[in-house]
Image: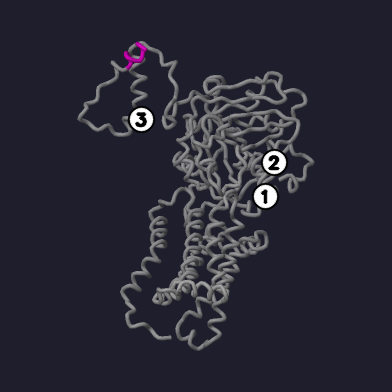
Amino acid sequence: MSRISRTWRSYPRIDSSEITPESVWLNRRNLMKTAAVAAGITAAGETVAQPKVLKDLNFSSAVANTPFKAGEDLTPYEAATTYNNFYEFGTDKSDPARYADAMTTDPWEIKVGGLVNKPGKLYLEDIVNGFDLEERIYRFRCVEAWSMVVPWIGFPLSKLLERFEPTSEGKFIEFKTLYRRSEMRGTRSFTSIIDWPYREGLRLDEAMHPLTLMTVGLYGKTLPNQSGAPLRLIVPWKYGFKNIKSIVEINVTDRQPKTSWQDLAPQEYGFYANVNPEVSHPRWSQAYERRLPSSLFNPNRVKTQMFNGYGEQVAGMYKGMDLANYY
Amino acid sequence: MSIPLDWNPALRVLVFLACLGPFVLLVNGVVSNSLGPDPAEHLMHITGEWVMRFMVLVLLATPLARHGWPRLARYRRMLGLYVWFYATVHLLVFAQVFIGWSGDQLVRELVDRPYVLVGFLAWLILVPLGITSVQTIRKRMGRYWRQLHKLTYVVAVLGWLHLFWLSRSDVGNAVLYGVIFGLLLLYRIRPIAKRVSFKLRS
């Protein structure tokens, strides 16, 4: 307890007559940290309590001229973090940015089990500090025909899976999102027909692919809640809904897992959900996409590429499959 | 058709401007680029929503006019034309942002996506309804005008189907308009309307 009082004593004084602007208030934690370091105290025991305070991450930058770094212009941070689908917080694109801060992301634990030799748990500290973080600049293509280019920070999913040692019977990976009604207003909607929690899945070879990223941040900082804090999946050659957010459970299975959207409308959403301009969707043409930010008079419509432009790296996994059937 | 003497032209202008309000806000949003990173989606959503809202007002005007607010009947034509107006803006945004004014793309959309077909049909029906709203044409048409404008009910059903088909995981909006349209269309079935007016009078 003396540690806390010492921290407070060295906290820079703000005149009580002054009204503290929000930016300063939000910075308080950083000020405290600085003060603590100055007083010779490590900040190791500190936890990230305010979801809005995003931490800087240490990572190696994406290497140019590789599939890990898309050559296109980045989507502005503001657009990437205010225009999201995260139905747990509402179906409007602005709902996640508005309401996702209600979600507690610290403490956080992820159960890893199923067909693995070493089932166990991962904690928030493990996922931010336990892996070498890399930057990946990927195209992100939503099935709703809009797209972005985002600098994600994360580590290959294969690295995570290796720790838990999938057995030889393991053929698929199943993921689940947090389901906490008290913090997720979208899940409390009476007219929502999604069977929570949100579930997604990958084939084992897709999960082990070097492009598949367990993502903890974007734009150099930890993920804001609306982007799926603290841990989400990014599979750049698949439609956005495969990129499950705020993961709390990972299971290795021998059967193709049920996924939320496929469950809801199998004629619209397949298990594979590979970006494919040839396969039309009942709601949206997939031939083109709006690269955001877009505007009315400059819609920025671009042709959608097969496998979102990652065909060279991933097409081999689907050799011999009729992709019109396995959409 | 007698025009009530207490009909107030200033009020009429006010209602006209109020109905135009949502459109002005959208134009302002486009010009100031404040509709977010994907204005296309926003514009489609909002204009579609206003089509539905004006449809509700149109369908409400007659029953309300019959049961105590006779002056509302005078606004039915304006409201109907606003349905057409917002539906047209909806369609123009679709042409601009979703199909890039390509005829081939439009045909593909109509063939591939039933909800687009249904919405487009609804708009096509609104065209003759809008044109025949001109007073001189209306008078020349006599009793046929009334018959033609019964197509409003078909537009309502098609518009609702369009919305229902678009529902993904939350059917709240579709259910809401389904109930409202359902009640207002039920009212059009003569025996039911009679029973309602009987109850209101007694």
The amino acid marked with disc number 1 is Glu
- Where is residue A151? Give x, y as percent: 52, 34
Task: Inspect the image, locate mark 3, and give the three-letter code of the amino acid beneath it.
Answer: Leu
Query: Which residue is pictured at 20% across the width and 30% down the height?
Result: A17
Q: Which residue is mark 3?
A: A26
Calculate the distance from the C-alpha at mark 3 to the C-alpha at mark 1: 43 Å
Q: Position of residue B132 (x, y in %)?
A: 51, 80
Tags 2 and 3 on a common chain: yes
Q: Is residue B36 above or below residue B178?
A: above
Residue under numbered circle 1: A268
Q: Quadrant location of the C terminus of chain A?
A: top right
* Image: A102 above or below B11: above
Identify which residue, A265 or A66, lies in the foreground. Answer: A265
Comes first in the chain, label 3 or label 1? 3
Question: Residue most toward the front?
Answer: B202
A12 to the left or right of B110: left
**Which residue is located at x 44 percent, y 31 percent?**
A51
Q: Are marks 2 and 1 in contact (CB under 8 Å)?
A: no
Q: Position of residue B151 (x, y in %)?
A: 57, 75
Residue tagged 2: A272
Chain at numbered mark 2: A
Question: What is the x, y in percent for residue A185?
Answer: 50, 41
Q: Are marks 3 and 1 in contact (CB under 8 Å)?
A: no
SS at mark 3?
helix
Quadrant of the rendered image containing residue B78: bottom left
Marks 2/3 in contact by CB < 8 Å: the verdict is no
The range drawn in magenta is A1-7
The answer for which chain carries disc 1 is A
Drawn side of residue A273 relative to residue A36, left or right: right
